[in-house]
Image: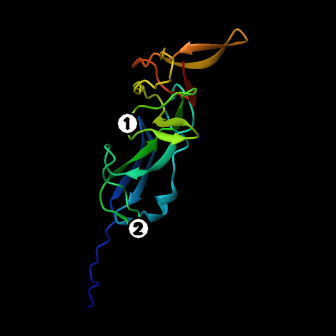
Amino acid sequence: LIQPKPYFYYSRNTLHLTFYNVNQVEETIGLPYQTDISSYSSYEPDEYPIETAGNKDWTFVGWYKDPNYTIEMNFTDAKLDEDLILYAKWQAPEYTVTYNLNGGTWTDTSSEYEESNSNYLLNVSENTSINAPSNPTRTGCAFEGWYYETTLNGETVEIKYLFDQSQTINKDIELKAK
């Protein structure tokens, strides 16, 4: 009498690959243990999920293994051997603050400003407040402040920029010395 040899069949455990987008789960996928997940490297969230004041497009940077964005996910030959949560990192849009010297001389020595056509430029992320640069000088003139133009009731008016921490940059802006 021949006895059949016993054999064992194992089913691989299902693990979860979760894509977390800022404040919400974008998608969770159940996959068998040791599944190659390199094909998920091209997966991108639809959009930045939080509406911002300027509401300009944020740029998706990539997936990270931690919520502080210090360990970037390397999808090359990646296998799922435990539940994995990936965090979407986004870059805020940047805007340019142009300081128009209006015939004056730049006096600020900070390296954060870039000279361009007798103006000075400062690039900042959306919703950033800015500090006032050193006052420019102009022979025979007293510096009053930095002003920007806006339209109120169909007319263009100049408004003094206050450099208040509650005032944030949400578009490109030109500040003119007066």
Is 177 above or below relative to 36? above
Residue 165: x %, y % from top left? 39, 19
Q: Quadrant of the N terminus?
A: bottom left
Instruction: Name the residue that disc number 2 marks.
Output: 76
Residue 142: x %, y % from top left? 48, 15
Is 112 above or below relative to 62? above
Category of crowding for the residue at label 2, using alpha-carbon neighbours closer than 10 angstroms: few (below 14), some (14–19), many (at least 20): few
SS assignment at label 2: loop
Residue 51: x %, y % from top left? 52, 28
Q: What amino acid type should be assigned to the residue bearing mark 1?
A: Thr
Is 153 above or below relative to 3? above
Q: Is residue 53 left or right of residue 68?
A: right
Q: Please tell me which residue lies in front, 139 or 4.
A: 139
Residue at 50% in and 27% down: 169
Residue 44: x %, y % from top left? 51, 50
Is 56 above or below relative to 177? below
Q: Is residue 173 left or right of residue 142?
A: right
Q: What amino acid type should be assigned to the residue bearing mark 2?
A: Thr
Hey, which residue is sitting farthest front in the picture?
140
Q: Could you give the CA–CA distance between mark 1 and mark 2, rounded to whole angstroms?
A: 45 Å
- Image quarter for residue 134? top left
Q: Quadrant of the C terminus?
A: top right
Q: Please tell me which residue lies in front, 146 or 64.
A: 146
SS assignment at label 1: loop
Closer to the N terminus: mark 1 or mark 2?
2
Q: Is residue 114 left or right of residue 172?
A: left
Instruction: Name the residue that disc number 1 marks.
Output: 109
